[in-house]
Image (cartoon, rainbow, N blue to C red):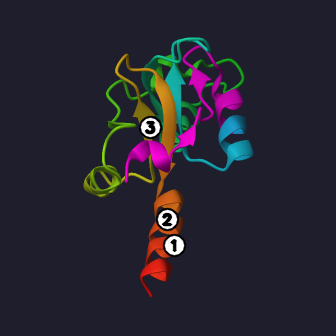
Amino acid sequence: MKVRDLMIKNPTCCLSSDSAQHVARLMREHDVTSLPVISDLQSRHLEGMITERELCWGIIAEGKDPKTTAIADYLNHNPVTCKAEDELDHCEKTMQQHQMRSITVVDDEGSCVGSVSQGDLAVFNQFLSRRRA
């Protein structure tokens, strides 16, 4: 099975110019611990990832104002990704290897087209187990 068959299409993303507070609200609203950071809403070119750890340790712990501090200086510019054409097993192994709860799916141009979470994989694997029984 391919990643494209399981991925959530067009996941919630943020911009590097977004404030830490806005990004934290997005994470809370969508119940996620990280978000893809894209260049713009049209191309959705992946610039990096921002996690709750960067928000907490890099912005809050340093005493910066989350209402006015943009996340641009706190994101990971080299995120681990996968492609929609990748085998799901490869995606799962990559997530395990890098101890990731979710992975961003990019196309050949580097645009964010989807995401796969541990929860998505768990539900799918449970479904497969039931089918085999």
Would you place residue 35 above or below residue 69 in this image?
below
Q: Nearer the viewer, mark 3 or mark 1?
A: 1
Instruction: Say which residue appears at 68% left-offset and 17% top-offset.
Output: 68
First-in-chain label (3 vs 2): 3
Would you place residue 79 above or below residue 86 in this image?
above
Q: Secondary structure at mark 1?
A: helix
Instruction: Say which residue appears at 50% left-offset and 41% top-offset.
Output: 115
Q: In the image, is 90 to the left or to the right of 103?
A: left
Instruction: Say which residue appears at 74% left-offset and 43% top-offset.
Output: 29
Q: In the image, is 92 to the left or to the right of 11?
A: left
Examine the structure image and report whether residue 2 is included in the region drawn in magenta.
yes
Residue on which the image places disc 3:
104
Q: Amino acid at mark 3?
A: Thr
Residue on which the image places disc 1:
127
Q: Residue 58: image x %, image y %?
A: 48, 33
Furthest residue in direction bottom, as rendered: 133
Quadrant in which residue 26 is drawn: top right
Residue on which the image places disc 2:
124
